[in-house]
Image: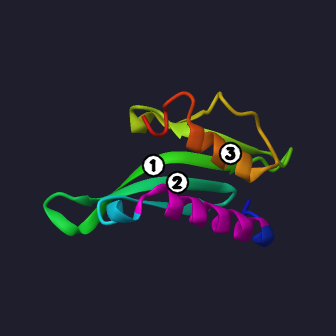
Amino acid sequence: MALPEQIQNVVEAKLGVYCFKKVPANMRKEVRLTFSVLGSTVTLFEERPVQNNLDKRSKLPLAQFRLNVVDHLWRLYFARPNRQEGWALYPDVEPTSDFEALLLALDQDRSGVFWG
């Protein structure tokens, strides 16, 4: 199920600002944060230039925000260390209706699973 348009607009605006502010201006040629929306899932990626072809960028999935259609709460997931193993629920934040609370938890990263 797709995110309702109003919710998607808010999420895209808030995450867009987060991505822009998270990476210092002097580092934006080397790394940038992007995201995609698919259904009720928003995936955050880290992008870096490919070493031998600076016109291409590699995308590493970092986090997922999922809106549960039953309880209408957002949940934050992290990519497992072996990316082929999928996603795991981030244990340091409870499901919430406040998307910004998940951005704060992502930024604080008490477990070190997002930012090392």
Location of residue 95 in the rendering, given as x and y in whole percent from the top left corner: 77, 38
Disc marking residue 12: none
Please name the residue that numbered disc 3 is placed on: 102
In the rendered structure, the answer to whether residue 53 lies left or right of residue 56 reads left
Location of residue 86 in the rendering, given as x and y in whole percent from the top left corner: 49, 37
Which one is earlier in the sequence, the residue at label 3 or at label 1?
Answer: 1
Disc 3 and disc 1: Cα gap in Å?
Answer: 16 Å
The secondary structure type at the circle numbered 3 is: helix
Please name the residue that numbered disc 2 is placed on: 44
> Most prominent secondary structure in the magenta stretch?
helix
Disc 3 and disc 2: Cα gap in Å?
Answer: 12 Å
Using the rendered view, name the quadrant where residue 51 is placed.
Answer: bottom left
The secondary structure type at the circle numbered 1 is: strand
**Camera-side residue of 98 and 4:** 98
Q: What residue type is disc 3 on?
A: Leu
Point out the residue furthest to the right here.
71
